[in-house]
Image (cartoon, grey):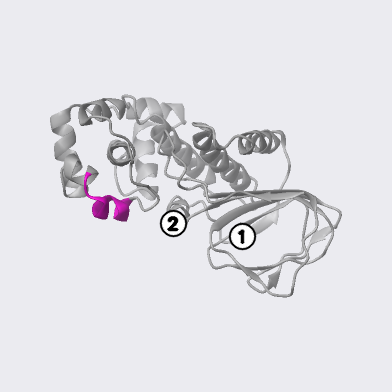
Amino acid sequence: MSWTSPYIGDLVRQRNFPLRAVRLFYCNGSCFRSNGEPHISRFFEVSLRLGSAASLCEDQINGTSMRIPFPNTVFKRIGSKLLLAGEKPRDTISFSFDREQEELLEKWGMIPDELYWPIQLNDELQRLISRWRQLVRCYTVPGMADQLDLVCFQIIQELLQQREPAAADEGSANRIQKAALYLLHHYDREINCDEVAAKFGFSHAAFFREWKRFFDVSPKNYVLEFRLDAAARQLVQSSLPIARIVKEVHFSGVTAFHRKFRERFGVTPDTFRNSPELWIKKFPELKINDN
């Protein structure tokens, strides 16, 4: 049995996490017969081949045979050419992202040069896969897509931790990525950078030094930009008054919000809300609010 979701990038999210899964897939004991022509990836896809009756996976990616055992993972870049080999049944799950999310993952250092490798189904990865399967059954229920986005991100983190040989600074890089994820999921709260640094095992100086290696803005401005983007999405997707939106995204006040919003988007919040030609460039996945 196999199943592929429709495009889910336009499902309404409540947390506005930037890494939005746009397509889901799984198969249990399914066989895939190739017609001899490679499949060209339209999305950035993370595939976990969890098991097969075959001893080796001999699929070709960009003309090169993988020849790796099951279970394994494959990171398929947009434009990658994949040719399936063998006709024995497989168990697989996968999730995909749009180009914008692929670029963000690359910026975060989360797309390795080697795009496939054997994996271990350790306790943590099995827990995440089980959670992923649970969420796939109800991904259209409000709030579930947000949880699915997070689990997909956590699966990527776990896969990268299993890579060999590990980069010398993988530990600090992974902790910075987790700190960034923590900030995004707590954007609607007061941020204390020293507390965040300590939570992920950094001193004040080390946290900011390592942060600069991956991000062009400070942690506080990183959260500020995310709050503004979250507010902009709510302007488009809801009819909430601006004062309510300001409170929900934990901004310091309406006046400061108007000033910072204009600095980021070049127009006032009201103008942005009423100008689809403006917000559709920033958030092409959003739909016009019909309320």
Q: Give the range drawn in magenta.
A: 274-282
Residue 19 location in percent, x, y?
A: 46, 45
How many tags in the picture?
2
| Residue type, mark 1 in image | Leu
Based on the picture, tell me whether residue 278 belongs to the magenta stretch. yes
Near-viewer residue (150 or 72): 150
Q: Which residue is at 15% across, 32% downward? A: 256
Residue 228 location in percent, x, y?
A: 27, 39
Nearer the observer, disc 1 or disc 2? 2
Which quarter of the figure is the C terminus placed in?
top left
Disc 1 element: loop
Q: In this view, does 158 lie above or below 30?
A: above
Relative placement, left or right, of 204 versus 276 is: right
How crowded pointer 2 is (Cα within 10 Å; few <14, some 14-19, many 20+) is rated as some
Residue under numbered circle 1: 115
Any mark on residue 103, and which?
2
Any mark on residue 268, and which?
none
How crowded pointer 1 is (Cα within 10 Å; few <14, some 14-19, many 20+) is rated as some
Residue 250 occupies quadrant: top left
Relative placement, left or right, of 266 versus 247 is: left
